[in-house]
Image: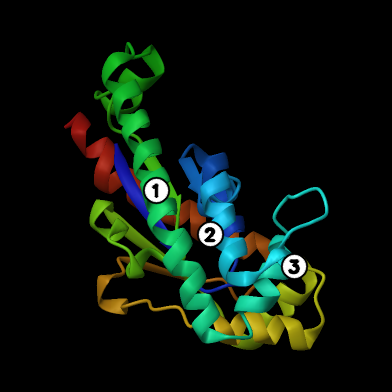
Amino acid sequence: MKIICLVGEIGTGKTTVAKILENLGADVIYSDYVAKIVSSKSAIKSELVKFFGKKILYRNGRLNRKKLANIVFSNRDKLEKLNEIMLPQIVKEIKKILYQKEKLEKTSKPTIKKIKRTKKEDERIVVIEAPLLFITNLYKKCNEILYVTCPIDLRIERVASNMNLSEKEAKLRVEGQNLYIPIEKVNYIINNNKDMNYLKKEIKKYYKYIQDRYLFKSLF
């Protein structure tokens, strides 16, 4: 199993890239999905309410993620507190998922398709969509780090459109994220500044690069 960590600022199109990779055959772990699992746990939700107040809950007790996002992206200290509460649990959950995948691979019988493709049943591509990768120790699990980027104006435009926010709200989220990405640790960069056809071509090119580097070389 080869692990690709996908990073990028809000609005760069990480989730779109992850879905394209998934369609190409990668096994994707979406950090937002993991965050939903973590935040639904009663102990974590109680800790969030304790710090941010009951205003972050709907009447039925479910977490109002939009309300919470509006609070933290306008206040750096509160964003750091949210990360302090959530990140260790998100990383723990992702590691648990990776362990389960590794265990499944070791116990399952190889199929003809897998043998033809890699000659090794444990060689497949798992993508972790993890924007906050570098403020955790999760990056140490990666074989490759893919960085998706684009100009800030385009990011603001996408965030406003995708999340149904005003330009002011979108700008707050984009500028408030303050994401740390050390370029020297990145293996591959894709600039998602054009249309979908261009992005798909770039992702296909990247996926072939990954296959050539990690999978098909085992055939020779």
* Mark 2 residue element: helix
Q: CA distance from mark 1 to mark 2?
A: 44 Å
> Residue 197: x and y, percent?
65, 60
Amino acid carrying label 1: it is: Lys
Q: Residue at x 24, y 25 (%)?
A: 120
**Inter-mark Cα distance, 1 to 3:** 47 Å
Assign a secondary structure to mark 1. helix
Q: Earlier in the sequence, mark 1 or mark 3?
A: 3
The image position of residue 56, as x and y in percent, is: 71, 65
Q: Is residue 25 left or right of residue 172?
A: left
Q: Are marks 2 and 3 in contact (CB under 8 Å)?
A: no
Residue that carries the numbered disc 3 in the rendered image: 55
Query: Compared to 99, does 151 lie above or below?
Result: below
Q: Nearer the viewer, residue 116 or 27?
A: 27
Label 1 crowd bin: few (<14), some (14–19), many (20+), radius 10 Å? some
Q: Residue furthest left?
A: 220
Q: Specify the amino acid type for callout 2.
A: Glu
Amino acid carrying mark 3 in the image: Lys
Residue at 40% in and 18% down: 113
* Tag 1 residue: 208
Q: CA distance from mark 2 to mark 3?
A: 13 Å
Q: In the image, is residue 48 above or below residue 120?
A: below
Q: Secondary structure at mark 3?
A: helix
| Residue indicated by mark 2 | 47
Q: Nearer the viewer, mark 1 or mark 3?
A: 3
